[in-house]
Amino acid sequence: MAWTRKLPSGRWHAEYRDATGRKRAVPGTFLRQSDAKHAGEEEEARIRSGGWTDPRLARIKFDEWAEHYMTLPSEQRATTKARDESYLHCQILPAFEGVALGAIQPSTFRLG
């Protein structure tokens, strides 16, 4: 359940717990307590529906994530791995290099 806290400025701050139980803050502050509470409840609803993204993980750049992913152990044949690396370097990285994972949405970028 989301909760609120009144700041010394008189504005309201909202907090909630993510899917792992970690305490999170809603970005920004609010003039009314009810608005802050509603914002916290919206974040909780996103968690329950599966539409919530961890803001910290969303800031990771695609190329950093892809580099890490390609180093993970795999049962792929060498030719399959070589093909995937070729696709990554020739088609995907030019479009997504330097883009935060959280910014990637369907239809945001076109490959090719």
Image (cartoon, grey):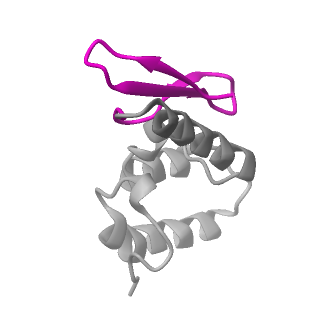
Question: Is 3 inside the magenta-drawn segment?
Answer: yes
Q: Quadrant of the C terminus?
A: bottom left
Q: Nearer the viewer, residue 91 or 15?
A: 15
Residue 72, compared with residue 18, is above or below; it is below
| Residue at the bottom extreme, as displayed | 112
The quarter of the picture where residue 17 lies is: top right
Residue 91, compared with residue 33, is above or below; it is below
Q: Position of residue 39 (x, y in %)?
A: 51, 41
Q: Position of residue 62 (x, y in %)?
A: 40, 55
Q: Is residue 45 left or right of residue 3?
A: right
Q: Nearer the viewer, residue 101 or 112?
A: 101
Q: Residue at x 45, y 46 (%)?
A: 58
Question: Is 34 inside the magenta-drawn segment?
Answer: no
| Residue at the top extreme, as displayed | 8
Q: Residue at x 35, y 66 (%)?
A: 96
| Residue at the left extreme, as displayed | 9
Q: Residue at x 68, y 51 (%)?
A: 74
Q: State the extent of the magenta-drawn residues as a range.
A: 1-30
Q: Nearer the viewer, residue 56 or 95?
A: 56
Q: Position of residue 105 (x, y in %)?
A: 47, 68
